[in-house]
Amino acid sequence: MSIGYACIHMGSTKTKLSTIYLKNFSEEKFLAILDSNLKALEEIINYNIANNIKVFRISSDIVPLASHPINTVPWWDIYRDRLITLGKLIKMNGIRVSMHPGQYTVINSIHENVILKSIEDLRYHTRFLDSLGCDKSSKIVLHIGGIYGDKELSIQRFIDNYKKLDSSIKNRLIIENDDKSYNVEDVLYISEQANIPVVFDTLHHRLNPPQDNKYNQYEWLELCGRSWHKDDGKQKIHYSQSANNYKNGAHSKYIKASTFLDFYSNLKNKDIDIMLEVKDKNLSAIKCSLLIDDDLKIKYLEREWARYKYYVLSNSTKNYQAIRALLKDKSNPDALKFYSLIEASLDCEITKNAQINAIEHMWGYFKKESTENEKKSFLKLLQGYKENTKTLSSIRNFIYRLSYKYSIEYLLDSLYFYISED
DNA sequence: CACCGTCAAGTCGCA
DNA sequence: TGCGACTTGACGGTG
């Protein structure tokens, strides 16, 4: 079993994708942005390698305006070598990448131009994965589309249009149950008619189950597994938790450890790939991987602790002490306890005292080295925060800039700068 | 530098 | 009829 995350990466500034808007599109600008995006992707892949994350969804935004008529730049040619090199890095490290076009790509639309644009978009996604040299197990996930007042007709339109697609697209396309129109039973029906692997999405299933829901989610999941053939790679599923008590399909801030473990223990076939859909992305992917690691080493939790430490300290001194105590026992690493304490810190109310305490801890890195002006600025900011005239984020920015200036890697890697809220 | 409206695109549901 | 949700941050103009 491998666990992965989608598109965005948290905890580094070097992994951000850039984009370009129609009104200032130019070949030069486009190529510069694609260049920077490929560098960011390489950063992300290297991070995934270092953290043993084997499943990753590449953002459709990697090539901006890729399928828009304005963009006639043959980027796959211009950056051929770089794409191949990147693909090799992915392949050699056993990473499985995928893509997922957004809600605008609808091949069962009743509008001919929407279908045509959607096919163009699928061509783009296929071309990107092809350019990396990925095999057939690198998939492109698609929803079925709209209902247009007649579900049966719309399902048939999907099947007919699917059959007309280029085989290079069909090799990669897989279909997913969505949260309001097409439930897992509908998607399995389409799968049987057109021989397409099905991605089972747990949250969508919960929001939109078949009417006579005759199986439980684990049984549906197994049924979906039968639609995967050998060269499609391992069965993939999407797992997420709801942000607002199943009111809509919004994803939670993080994957709750105990809930995930419960789900995992009920899985019959553990030889599948799980794509997490969650706001904190790679953080939850690492968490879930460690939670199910049979051979968990204390050093993995210690590495996690290094990242979370100042964030936890800024929110809860009590949890900070509890985690320190937990990690003292090096012979018996307990990921569930560890992450439950992290979660408690993510959920607790911000208090000024804890924030100030964490800031003073971090300031310790600069006390000696910093210039007189920096010391003055710091004291002024801190005083301002205490008196409500300065925001927390202005202090955070200040400390981040100092960390960068003095190359304090430990702080630069701290999630304190990336997951804190005001 | 902080703030905030806008961004290429589709469909559905609700006021 | 028109707007928000889905999801999503980053761009770029303004003050």
Image: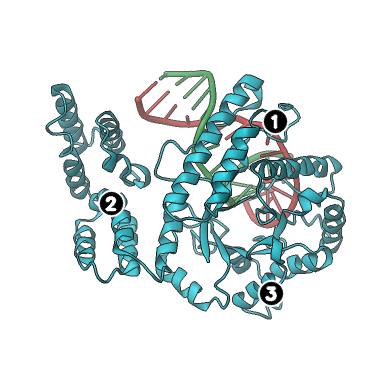
Chain colours: A cyan, B red, C green
**Which chain letter goes with mark 3?**
A
Quarter of the figure with the C terminus of chain A: top left
Secondary structure under the numbered disc 3 in the rendered image: helix
Image position of A106 (left or right of A332):
right
Q: Quadrant of residue A356?
A: top left
- Residue that mark 1 sits on: A77
Q: Earlier in the sequence, mark 3 or mark 1?
A: 1
Image position of A216 (left or right of A242):
right
Circle 3 residues within 10 Å: few <14, some 14–19, many ≥20: some
Circle 2 residues within 10 Å: few <14, some 14–19, many ≥20: some
Q: Amino acid at mark 3?
A: Leu
Q: Are marks 2 and 3 on the same chain?
A: yes
CA gap between label 2 and label 3 equals 41 Å
Residue mark closest to the camera, 2 vs 1? 1
CA gap between label 2 and label 1 equals 42 Å
* Residue toward you, A28 or A339: A28
**Which chain letter goes with mark 1?**
A
Residue mark closest to the camera, 3 vs 1? 1
**Which chain letter goes with mark 2?**
A
Residue beneath the point at 15% across and 29% down: A369
- Residue that mark 2 sits on: A306
* Residue toward you, A186 or A328: A328
Percent position of residue C4, x then y: 58, 46
CA gap between label 3 and label 1 equals 41 Å
* Residue toward you, A406 or B6: A406
Q: Which label is found at residue A64?
A: none
Percent position of residue A312, x then y: 27, 53
Q: Which label is found at residue A223?
A: 3
Q: Earlier in the sequence, mark 2 or mark 1?
A: 1
